[in-house]
Amino acid sequence: MSLQKDPDRYEMKYLHKFVDLKDKRVLEIGCGEGRLTWQYAKDAKSVVGVDLEHDSLRVAKVDRPVSVESTVTLACADSEYLPFTKEKFDIAILAWSL
Amino acid sequence: MVHALEEIRRVLTPDGILIDMRPLADNWRVEVVSLREVKRTGRVEDLPTQTNGDLAANEAMKAVEKRGWFKREQDELFPLFYSWDTPSEMEEFVDDDWQDFVGLTEDTKRATRSAWAIADGDSRVRVRVEILIARWKKFS
């Protein structure tokens, strides 16, 4: 299969145009397999990616680049009941999930 | 959706930012593209539930803005492409991965195959999706 999704990387261009991720704590809701996550994670201070799909998260955990292993945390969670009591985030990204 | 947005608001810092990035359901164009030209051959058929999803998401954002939870600061549309080497690969992907919500008509399949067959050697087939990105600032 020769599929290329967003070969021009417009998503990243527009994400960077809309928000400065540098040194920010980011929550990504609907991270899926991490396709978008890996592209911006190196810029952020920390990233928590949540998704309801176990299979997608399993792929994300396998595919997570070594370079962002200490930056990105992945969790199975429902956006209606986020499992954070004390943690605060500077930026939340609803990635194809609203 | 509104409850999820309330949760997001809860975990954001007082001056936190919410980025809403999502594909819009209507008008996913099918194109055959080469270095020389872009030829539109049809569109992906979307089901009413998808368009309803867009409306529901827009309504949810309007509701939270009305409640004073978030303020829209900026929004824009941009294209995102799914691209394949051949029409058959596109058809296979649509059948396998998008079968629950979209499809290709026989007319579109035929037009795409024909356009690709007579196009330049570097031609690819792609679906153009419109993406909405919006920046919302949390109101404390």
Image: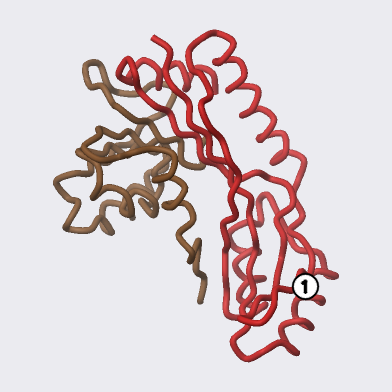
Chain colours: A brown, B red
Percent x, y of residue A77? 36, 31
Residue drawn where x is 32% and y is 19% of the image: B11
Residue A51 falls left or right of residue A24: right
Disc 1 packing (10 Å; few <14; some 14–19; many ≥20): some
Above or below, B56 against A23 in this view is above
Mark 1, chain letter? B
The residue singled out by tag 1 in the image is B109
Which percent across, then down, holds residue A43? 25, 47
Query: Residue at the spot x=66%, y=35% of the render?
Result: B54
Q: Residue B92 sits in which quadrant?
A: bottom right
Counting from the top left corner in percent of width and height, residue A60 is at 32, 52
| Quadrant assignment, res B86 | bottom right
Q: Is residue A85 left or right of residue B127?
A: left
Front residue (pair A18, A37): A18
On the image, the x and y values in percent for residue A81 come to 39, 21
Q: Residue furthest right?
A: B107
Q: Against B5, is B88 above or below?
A: below
Identify which residue is drawn at 65% across, 76% down.
Answer: B33
Instruction: Report the amino acid beneath label 1.
Output: Lys
A66, B99: nearer the viewer: A66
Secondary structure under badge 1? Answer: helix
Picture quadrant of residue B102: bottom right
Q: Residue at x 25, y 34 (%)?
A: A24
In the shown orientation, is residue B57 left or right of residue A42? right
